[in-house]
Amino acid sequence: MSGAANYFAWQGQMVTPKLGRRVIEAGCGTGNFTGMLLDREAVLAVDSEPACVERLRELYRAHQNVEARVCDVAAPEFLELARFRADSCVCINVLEHVANDEEALRAMGSVVQPEGVVVLLTPAFPALYGPIDQRLGHHRRYTRRSLTQTAEAAGLRVESLRYMNWVGFFGWWANAHILKRQQQSEAQIAVFDRAVVPWLSWMEARVAPPFGQSLLAVLRSP
């Protein structure tokens, strides 16, 4: 979603209020979402790609409350992050890349304090899966039911689930099944970001849609 500033800001506005003061970000990439957490007491951003972690460190080197480490959510070392005493773990568009998503969720739940929150943003609906998903390395897309089952199997309690971006649902389906696109169109993204996101975000802030391109989940640890 390169250049989709409005869309990214909308996602951030939906996610950040659900997080606490000490946050682990699992799969931080180059730190775009990390920049929305700079008001927190402490942020531990981790990613499996050393180049991404180095870029994030450089970007936020002036922020003493932000720490970045190379660590994969699927690695045993991730469990050691429990020493950070986080009240929240956030995972934005990463879980779909993990082969064993149940174990990844179990790990996220184990690194937060009791009754801590795990917030996920994932792609929604297997029917939308197409060449772009495959090229991006997505193992799956989720429904409310499938994510609930996976979370509960991982020992987490579902607090809320809601779909986001019902307009994008139709665009992604067309790209996958009609246009057969291998990658996202920059022109499509630009038009969606400028012309659709402002009114769509206003609408969905007031009424949760019954379906959407993405699924936002808030889970609780035991």
Image: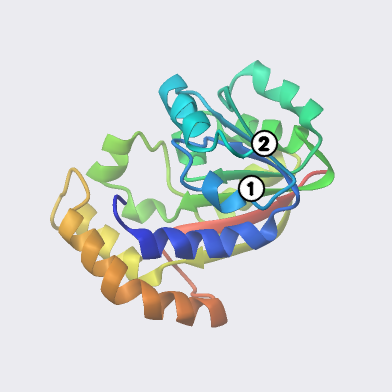
Look at the picture and state if 112 lies above or below 15: above
Q: Does residue 213 appear anywhere in the picture? A: no
* Crowding at mark 1 (Cα within 10 Å: few <14, some 14-19, many 20+): some
**Disc on the earlier residue, 2 or 1:** 2
Mark 1: amino acid: Gln
Residue 137 vs residue 35, the one in the foreground: 35
- Report crowding for label 2: few under 14, some 14 to 19, many 20 or more residues within 10 A (C-alpha): few
Instruction: Kindly indicate the quadrant of the structure image that contains residue 195.
Output: bottom left
Q: How is the image coloured?
A: rainbow
Q: Looking at the image, is 163 positioned above or below residue 133?
A: below
The disc labelled 2 sits on which kind of residue? Gln
Which residue shows up at 42% across the image and 42% down it?
A: 140
Residue that appears at 66% across and 23% down: 78
Q: Nearer the viewer, mark 2 or mark 1?
A: 2
Q: Position of residue 222 (x, y in %)?
A: 84, 43
Q: Is residue 120 above or below residue 9?
A: above
Q: Tally the marks.
A: 2
Residue sitting farthest toward the front: 62
Distance in Å between CA atoms under marks 2 and 1? 38 Å
* Residue in view at x 75 percent, y 46 percent: 41
Above-or-below relation of 130 to 97: below
Is residue 150 shown to the viewer in this render?
A: yes
User: Are dots 2 and 1 in contact, CB under 8 Å?
Assistant: no
Q: Residue furthest top?
A: 76
**Which residue is the site of mark 2?**
64
Q: Secondary structure at mark 2?
A: loop
Q: Which residue is mark 1?
A: 149
Task: Tell me which residue sits at (25%, 60%) in the image.
Answer: 189
